[in-house]
Image (cartoon, rainbow, N blue to C red):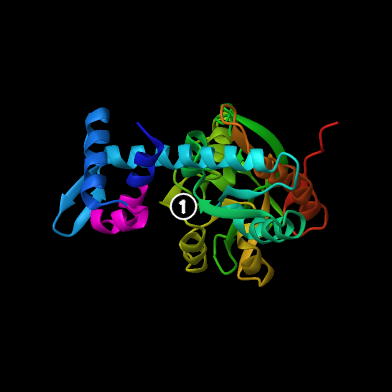
Amino acid sequence: MELRQLRYVIAIAKSGSLSKAAGQVFVAQSALSHQLAQLEEELGAPLFHRSRRGVEPTEAGRIFLAHATAILRQVEDARLAVQAAHGEPTGKVVFGIPHSVSAALALPLLQAVRERLPKVELELTEELTGNLVPQLRSGQLHLAVLFDDGLIGEFTQQPLLDERLLLISPAQAPDRPRQPAITLRTALALPLILPAAPHGVRPIIEQAARAQGLPRPNVVADISSISILRTSLLAGLGHTLLPPMPLRHELDAGLLAGVEVTPALTRRVVLCASRHLPLSAAADAVAALTAPLCRELARTGRWQGAAPVAAPD
C-alpha cells in the first residue's frame, strides 16, 4: 500500500468519477484504474460500486476512506511539524464541536485563532457527539470537544467547563412548571424531547435517573438536531433538558422558559485528543488557546449557564 494510492482513492470518492479523478491527480485513467485494482486486491474487498452514473464508495470503501484521510493528514502534520520546528505553528487543525456547544464556542475560537495563530488554518466540523468520537479515534479530527459521560477514557482530556442543565419549556405550555426549581423526578415525568442516545445530554440524563433510582425519562421524541429541537419546543410538542446556551435567544426573548432541576444536572465539557496519535504543533497551540478562552467566556457570562473548571497547577 502506497501513499499515492490513498490519494487516488480520496480523489475518486470526491469526484465520483475515475476520469475526473485521473485529471485531478495527473495520471492516465488506465494507470489510476490499475492502482485501484491493486489496492482492492490487497485489501480483499471492492472499494467502489461502479455504474453508468459513476462510482460511489462501498461500505468497505467508506471505512477505508476515513483511515486514508487520517493517514494523509498525519503525513502532512509531520511535514509541517518539521518546518515549524523553529517558527510559528503552521498548518490545518480540524476541530470537532458538538451542535449544542457551537453557538457558544465556534465564533470566539475562530476569532482567537485568527488573531493569535495567524498561520494556523482552523477547520471546524459541527457534529453529533456520537459521531465525533470515531472521527477523533481514527485521526480524522485533531481535537474535539466532548462531554465527560464516563465513556471517553480512551482520549486525553482537558476539562473546560461545567454546564448546568435546565428544564426548558414553551413559555405558554399549560404544564410548564411555574416554580423556580423542580425535582428531577418531576422533570423526567414530563413529555421530553431529547437527543437520541448516545448523543449529547442523553447519557447524562439517563445515568442521573439510574443513580437516583428514578424511572427512565418520558421521551416523546428523539431529536438530535438543535434547530429541529428548537422548532419542536416552540411548537409546543414537549419540554427538554439542556444547558441554556443553545436556546439562549429564545430564552432571552421569553419564548421559552427554563427552571433549575434538583438535584442539579450538570455536564462537564472536555477538550479531547487521541492518546495514540501525536498532535501537530498547530493543534497543540489551538488546544492551549481553547481552555483559557472557555474560562473567559464563562467568567464574563458569554457562555451562559457555564462555570469554569479551575486551571491545573
Residue 3: horizontal and vertical position, in percent? 41, 37
Q: Magenta: predominant secondary structure element?
A: helix
- The residue closer to the viewer here, 53 or 40, is 40
Considering the image in quadrants, where does the C terminus appear? Answer: top right
Give, as a three-letter code, the residue at label 1.
Ser
Residue 292: horizontal and vertical position, in percent? 79, 47
> Does dot 1 land on a helix, a strand or a loop?
loop
Residue at image position (27%, 29%) is 43
For residue 267, say whether it is visible: no
Q: In this view, does 38 lie to the left or right of 8?
A: left
Q: Mark 1 points at which residue?
A: 224
- The residue closer to the viewer here, 49 or 5, is 5
Residue at image position (56%, 27%) is 276
Q: Is residue 117 left or right of residue 3?
A: right
Residue 32: horizontal and vertical position, in percent? 26, 46
What span is colored magenta in the figure? 10-26
For residue 299, say whether it is visible: yes
